[in-house]
């Protein structure tokens, strides 16, 4: 079973920041938090991952709480092409386990 | 990041037949994985395929139904045998790349959309 919980769906206005939450209260000390997205049944696309520090790359920022029990993926300026299902996964050494994810709809 | 291609991209097959899906990676990787995504569902891991050893199957998946080959570090095949309409899914290949610092990253192919009639 997935070790994360995410809201099933969210809306975001185009050009605004999209903040996608994820709870992972049972995360262990050596598990990383990963985010992937899947656009219209294409293969999942890697976005970002982190252990305990906040991370930023060209796609997004990842904010992990100090107790590591939750995290937020931030898309700073959402576009229509960011409409997708976003998966939050905790992983170390075992297989990636995908939950149902959050369906993000970016609205014009 | 690794670039992954799959063949075929889609197919429509008759029940009782078999289909072999190919996965090609542009670099050598140790760990390759096969996933299934049924309509409207999330991804489910079928098996892990490491070169030089038998594939490791997840609960609910067996080698007779989903035989896997891994002849080298850049290629793998998944066969869906004796297909039924319940096998209609997207089948995805993925690879894992380790990092000197930070956790490994897993990359996915574009998927093979299979419809069984």
Image (cartoon, rainbow, N blue to C red):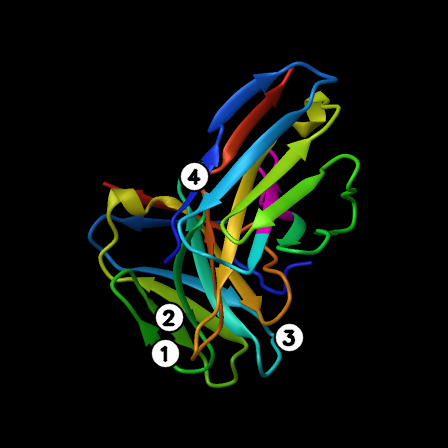
Mark toward the start of the polypeptide (4 vs 1): 4
Mark toward the start of the polypeptide (2 vs 4): 4
Q: Nearer the viewer, mark 2 or mark 4?
A: 4
- For marks 1 and 3, give the CA distance: 19 Å
x and y percent of residue B61 in the render? 76, 43
Mark toward the start of the polypeptide (1 vs 3): 3
x and y percent of residue B100 in the render? 43, 78
Which residue lies at the image location 28% right of the left edge and 43% below the top edge? A81
Q: Are marks 1 and 2 in contact (CB under 8 Å)?
A: yes
Query: Do the residues at pointers 4 and 1 share their chain?
Result: yes
In this figure, which residue is indicated by the disc labeled 2?
A62
Q: Chain of mark 1?
A: A
Secondary structure that dominates the magenta span: strand
Q: Quadrant of the N terminus of chain B?
A: bottom left
| Residue A42: assigned label | 4
Relative to residue A105, is residue B31 drawn left or right?
A: right
In this figure, which residue is indicated by the disc labeled 3?
A26
Is residue B10 shown above or below B54?
Answer: above
Q: Chain of mark 3?
A: A
The residues colored magenta run: B33-45
**Can residue B91 be seen in this snapshot?**
yes
x and y percent of residue B76 in the render? 57, 44
Q: Quadrant of the C terminus of chain B?
A: top right
| Residue A54: assigned label | 1
Secondary structure beneath label 3: loop
Closest to the observer, B28 or B46: B28
Q: Residues within 10 Å of mark 3 (few under 14, many from 20)?
A: few
Which residue lies at the image location 63% right of the left edge and 26% below the top edge? B19
Mark toward the start of the polypeptide (2 vs 3): 3
- For marks 2 and 4, give the CA distance: 23 Å
- For marks 1 and 2, give the CA distance: 6 Å
């Amino acid at each position: 079973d997935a070790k994360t919980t995410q809201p099933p769906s969210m809306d975001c206005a185009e050009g605004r920041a999209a903040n996608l939450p994820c709870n992972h209260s049972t995360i262990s000390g050596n598990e990383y938090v990963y985010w992937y997205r899947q656009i219209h049944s294409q293969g999942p696309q890697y976005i970002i991952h982190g252990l305990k520090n906040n991370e930023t790359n060209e796609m997004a920022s990842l904010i992990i709480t100090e107790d590591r029990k939750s995290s937020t993926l931030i898309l700073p300026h959402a576009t229509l092409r960011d409409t997708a299902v976003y998966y939050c996964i905790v992983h170390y050494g075992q297989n990636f386990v995908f939950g149902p994810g959050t369906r993000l709809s970016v609205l014009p | 990041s690794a670039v992954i291609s799959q063949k075929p991209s889609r197919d429509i097959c008759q029940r009782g037949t078999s289909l072999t899906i190919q996965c090609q990676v542009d670099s050598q990787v140790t760990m390759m994985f096969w996933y299934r995504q049924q309509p409207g569902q999330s991804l489910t891991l079928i098996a892990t395929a490491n070169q030089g050893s038998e594939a490791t199957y997840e609960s609910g998946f067996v080698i007779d139904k989903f035989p896997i080959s891994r002849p080298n570090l850049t290629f793998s095949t998944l066969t869906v045998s004796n297909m039924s309409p319940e096998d209609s899914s997207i089948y995805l290949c993925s690879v894992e790349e380790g990092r000197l610092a930070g956790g490994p990253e897993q990359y996915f192919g574009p998927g093979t959309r299979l419809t069984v009639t």
